[in-house]
Image (cartoon, rainbow, N blue to C red):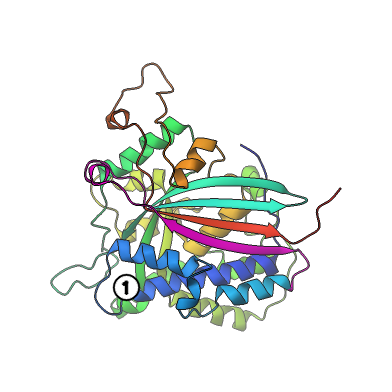
């Protein structure tokens, strides 16, 4: 895999984070308004909010058009494009095998940093309420979680020989949907530092190398003096919108789902214990890290084609003693229902 990182300063990273987090909050709010949405509805809404051609149909606190305008004011020469398309599964494939809900293609086009494309598969699940009143709780779980589906995705990951390339996206309501006592606990979890939000102005451009060396990736970069009271007020405002959309690595999910569907509390506890991303990372944090670091996603050609919704052959077992399974019954793995392309393109002149 190409070891290339996208060096973004705090200004550019903050712009992208603000837009992506606004999308996360908008999808989360939909869970507490109107009739309860299905996971498919939430995924379609997420894609529409991100899509450059459809996002203007919705009211966002920080729209993509404003993010682009603000990026143009930067000296780094960075702009961002987002688009999505949908794919239909045949009934046969849909009924017998379940692939991912979302394929994400991360593309970088820069005259200095070069070009790269990496693919990620994402399976989405929503949090369900408990009891007769279907109230949300820290002990609520993602009851539509299917262990066989997670194992199937793990098999695909192994067959393609890719790592850090399959994730779960969790749809959660904002803390106002929880009882007051539990809402306070949720905010306390997030106040412990599970998000990079308070540190955006100190995001290090060489985050990939920092992770490799074991340093806390939140440190470094050019400091910006922010009054503590102002910073804490913004952090409190952000915590009120959480847990919203979160992302977990497939291996994390498998490790905590041995005895049933993952619970919200179990994911929060895992994030505190591991202190590594993405155990239960906010959506905007994950995408920003995935753009900045080549450790997320794979640049393998067939894997990218799969995330784009193209038919690709099922790879043969990589080891002679590997047990064959249901994946070998397929000519091609099931394609994701939707594909998102997130492109960071430079407006700088080409050298040479």
Q: Residues within 10 Å of mark 1 (few under 14, many from 20)?
A: many
Q: How many marks?
A: 1
Disc 1 target residue: 31
- In the rendered structure, the answer to whether residue 18 lies left or right of residue 187 reads right
Name the residue rendered at 64%, 65% in the picture: 13
Residue 153's quadrant in the figure?
A: top left
Q: Secondary structure at mark 1?
A: loop
Q: Is residue 55 visible?
A: yes
Of 157 and 314, the residue lying toward us: 314
Residue 81's quadrant in the figure?
A: bottom right
Residue 336 x, y percent position in the rendering? 38, 49
Q: Residue lying furthest left in this view?
A: 132
Name the residue rendered at 57%, 40% in the picture: 299
State whether residue 4 is above or below residue 186: above
State whether residue 227 is above or below residue 39: below
Q: Which image quadrant: the N terminus?
A: top right
Residue 166 x, y percent position in the rendering? 43, 45
**Does the magenta portion include 76?**
yes
Q: Which residues are magenta?
A: 73-101
């Amino acid at each position: 895999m190409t070891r290339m990182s996208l060096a973004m300063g705090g200004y550019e990273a903050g712009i992208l984070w603000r837009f992506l987090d606004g999308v996360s909050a908008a999808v989360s709010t939909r869970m507490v308004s109107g009739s309860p949405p299905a996971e498919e509805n939430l995924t379609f809404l997420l894609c529409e909010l991100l899509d450059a051609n459809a996002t203007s149909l919705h009211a966002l606190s920080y729209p993509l058009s404003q993010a682009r305008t603000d990026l143009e004011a930067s000296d780094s020469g960075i702009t961002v494009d987002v688009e999505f398309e949908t794919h239909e599964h045949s009934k046969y494939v849909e009924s017998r095998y379940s692939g991912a809900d979302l394929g994400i293609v991360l593309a970088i086009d820069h005259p200095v940093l070069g070009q790269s494309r990496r693919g990620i598969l994402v399976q989405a699940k929503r949090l369900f309420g408990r009891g007769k009143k279907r109230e949300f709780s820290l002990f609520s779980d993602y009851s539509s979680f299917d262990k066989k589906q997670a194992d199937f995705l793990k098999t695909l990951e192994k067959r393609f020989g890719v790592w850090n390339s399959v994730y779960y996206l969790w749809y959660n309501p904002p803390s106002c949907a929880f009882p007051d006592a539990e809402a306070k606990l949720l905010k306390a979890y997030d106040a412990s530092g599970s998000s990079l939000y308070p540190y955006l102005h100190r995001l290090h451009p060489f985050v990939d190398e920092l992770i490799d060396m074991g340093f806390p990736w939140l440190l470094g970069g050019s400091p910006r003096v922010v009054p503590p009271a102002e910073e804490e007020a913004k952090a409190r405002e952000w915590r009120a919108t959480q847990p919203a959309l979160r992302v977990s690595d497939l291996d994390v999910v498998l490790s905590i789902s041995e005895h049933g569907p993952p619970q919200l509390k179990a994911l929060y506890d895992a994030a505190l214990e591991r202190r590594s991303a993405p155990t239960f990372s906010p959506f905007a944090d994950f995408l920003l890290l995935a753009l900045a670091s080549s450790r997320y996603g794979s640049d393998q050609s067939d894997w990218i084609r799969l995330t784009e919704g193209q038919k690709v052959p099922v790879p043969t077992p990589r080891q002679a003693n590997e047990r064959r399974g249901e994946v070998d019954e397929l000519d091609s793995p099931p394609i994701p229902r939707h594909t998102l392309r997130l492109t960071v393109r430079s407006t700088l002149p080409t050298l040479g």
